[in-house]
Every structure is written in structure tokens, then in C-alpha cells.
């Protein structure tokens, strides 16, 4: 029986829900899924320029696990890039280090101490319909 996977720590969730290529008709557009921990591995290694060992420590996983997550992320992004697919960033096996919400209306990413916060992204978006990204 495989061991249950422990949650990977995410320091900062993605700003957006995903990416769409342009030049591909909507009716032909297919999507691939990038998990939150796959996104975080790319952010830490390629954006923050950390060594994989450092990224593994921050995400609370072993170095081989980080490498596996990272390689899967690269494969998924490459497939989307080459085949013209959308990337949906969702799901995974993670916990966020802080409380993060996404506005249900304009999708802005908000870090907050409690769910009483409102989105103040634009004048016409003051909704309090926030989606808790902490599962
Ligand atoms: Zn909003």
C-alpha cells in the first residue's frame, strides 16, 4: 500500500487561475492541469533561483520528491507550450503557509487574516464573495 502523501507547503499561491494560448480557437482549446505544488516548485526554483534542496526544505518535502514534482511541472508546461493547450492551476496536495483568498468576481488574489475581508481591486469590485484557497 502506498504511503499517503503529506501536504506540501505553499508560500505563495499563483496570481491567476491559469493561462490560455492565443491563436487557438476556443472550441479547439484543451487544458492541462498544473497542481499548486507543481506551480510552487517552478516559482521557487526558476523564479526565486533556489537550489532544489532549498526549495524542498521550504515545501516540507524531500529533495527527490521536489525533483519529481518539479519535473512533472516542466513536462506539463512544456506540453501546453508545444501543443497549444491552456494551463489550469488547481488542486494538489498542499497547505498554504498563510490565509489566502481569491475574489469570486474579479479573481484577485488576497492575503488576509480572516474571511471578513473584501476585495478592493477596483471601484466596482467590492464583493465579499471570497474563495478560501486553504483547503
Ligand atoms: Zn474582486
Image (cartoon, rainbow, N blue to C red):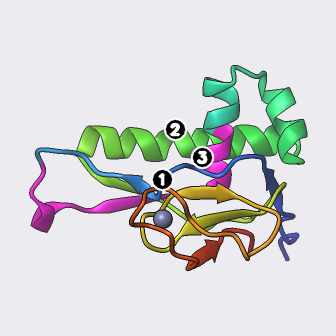
Return the mark for residue 39. 3
| Residue 44, image quadrant | top right
Q: Earlier in the sequence, mark 2 or mark 3?
A: 3
Residue 35 seen from this side: no
Q: Are marks 2 and 3 in contact (CB under 8 Å)?
A: no
62 or 22, which lies in front?
A: 22
Tell me the magenta residue range.
Answer: 24-41
Q: Earlier in the sequence, mark 3 or mark 1?
A: 1
Residue ID at (11%, 68%): 27
Q: Is residue 59 left or right of residue 40?
A: right
Q: Are marks 3 and 1 in contact (CB under 8 Å)?
A: no
Which mark lies nearer to you, 2 or 1?
1
- Disc 3 to disc 1, how far (Cα)? 11 Å
Q: Are marks 2 and 1 in contact (CB under 8 Å)?
A: no
Residue 82 seen from this side: yes
Please give the residue where the numbered disc 2 appears in the rendered image: 74
| Residue 66, image quadrant | top right
Residue ID at (46%, 47%): 76
Q: Is residue 25 magenta?
A: yes
Give the image location of residue 9, x and y in percent: 82, 53
Q: Quadrant of the N terminus?
A: bottom right
Q: Is residue 28 magenta?
A: yes
Which mark lies nearer to you, 2 or 3?
3
Ligand 1 within 8 Å, label 2 CB: no
Residue ID at (78%, 28%): 52
Q: Is residue 62 above or below residue 18?
A: above
Give the image location of residue 41, x and y in percent: 68, 40
- Disc 2 to disc 3, how far (Cα)? 9 Å
Label 3, secondary structure: give it: helix
Return the mark for residue 125. none
Ligand 1 within 8 Å, label 3 CB: no
Amino acid at each position: 500500500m502506498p504511503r499517503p502523501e503529506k501536504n506540501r507547503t505553499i508560500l505563495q499561491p499563483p496570481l491567476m487561475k491559469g493561462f490560455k494560448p492565443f491563436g487557438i480557437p476556443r472550441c479547439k482549446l484543451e487544458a492541462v492541469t498544473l497542481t499548486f505544488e507543481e506551480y510552487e516548485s517552478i516559482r521557487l526554483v526558476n523564479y526565486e533561483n533556489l537550489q532544489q534542496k532549498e526549495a524542498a526544505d521550504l515545501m516540507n518535502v524531500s529533495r527527490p520528491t521536489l525533483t519529481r514534482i518539479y519535473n512533472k511541472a516542466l513536462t506539463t508546461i512544456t506540453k501546453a507550450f508545444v501543443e497549444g493547450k491552456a494551463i489550469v492551476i488547481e488542486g494538489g496536495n498542499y497547505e498554504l503557509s498563510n490565509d489566502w483568498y481569491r475574489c469570486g468576481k474579479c479573481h484577485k488574489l488576497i492575503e488576509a487574516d480572516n474571511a471578513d475581508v473584501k476585495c478592493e481591486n477596483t471601484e466596482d469590485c467590492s464583493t465579499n464573495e471570497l474563495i478560501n484557497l486553504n483547503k
